[in-house]
Image (cartoon, grey):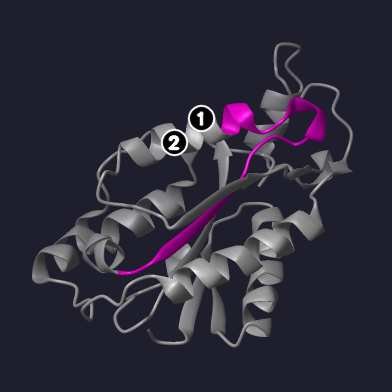
Amino acid sequence: MSAEVPDVYATRYGFTKEVAVTAAATLEEQGLEVEVKAARDVRSLDGFGAVLLGTPLHMGALHKDVRTHVERHQVALEQTPLALFALGPISAEEGVEGSRKQVDAALAKLPWLSPVATEVFVGAFDPAKLGFKDKMIAVLPASSLHGELAQDERDWEAIRAWAREAGQQIMNAPAQPLAIESAEQSKRQASGPASIGAASCPAE
């Protein structure tokens, strides 16, 4: 397989990007050439040997840019080894099992998408970074973010360990034919993705 791997991420507040950058550095230690890129900026996946994809997760929904990305590049992703990570809860105390089930449910809506490695990590939260809409939600007493202070419980060693394992899995995945995105995919790119559920996550 090609040693070139795009590390594609979506984020609103930068936390997922930071994990993507750390994962990319770990993959590069294994001899892979990795380019970290925002999902909305990816125009084609043709010719890449594998893909790393990172997304925040909230209420069972992938980030809208990731939903657009996987729909837009369906043909390529059907043929290319994919490792996927998600940032779920903002605190380790919450655990990630609920978020794992959300990832499974999101992937079940995309039966053609079969990651060779999938993981969920604890994310981070900083109320000072929230946009106006998220701030309005966070002040509601019923909001799970109400009264939450800034916190960052991301386990960087666990992230690096997973990236090393994921790197081995995508490097050992069977070679696939070169993915050439069809005219139909181009039409989808112009018209936008089918709906896969929508939610915004302030801990991204």
SS of the residue under disc 1: helix
Q: Do the residues labelled 2 and 1 touch (CB within 8 Å)?
A: yes
Residue under label 2, please give it.
104
Q: Magenta segment range?
A: 80-99
SS of the residue under disc 2: helix
Q: Residue 195, image x and y in percent?
A: 29, 39
Q: For the residue carrying disc 1, how many other residues have a C-alpha within 10 Å: few (<14), some (14-19), or many (20+)?
A: few
- Residue 28 numbered mark, or none: none
Taking depth in this image into account, of 35 and 142 the one nearest to the observer is 35
Q: Residue 82 magenta-drawn?
A: yes
The reply to whether residue 2 is in sight is yes
Q: Residue 134, image x and y in percent?
A: 66, 34
* Residue 24 lies in quadrant: bottom right
Q: Residue 12 magenta-drawn?
A: no
Q: Residue 89, image x and y in percent?
A: 69, 34
Amino acid type, callout 2: Asp
Marks 2 and 1 sit apart, C-alpha to C-alpha, by: 5 Å
133 shown above or below 114: above
Taking depth in this image into account, of 179 and 170 the one nearest to the observer is 170
- Residue 101 numbered mark, or none: 1
The reply to whether residue 55 is in sight is no
Q: Is residue 40 left or right of residue 193?
A: right
Q: At 38% from the left edge and 41% from the top edge, which residue is drawn?
A: 107
Q: Residue 53, image x and y in percent?
A: 49, 61
111 shown above or below 78: above
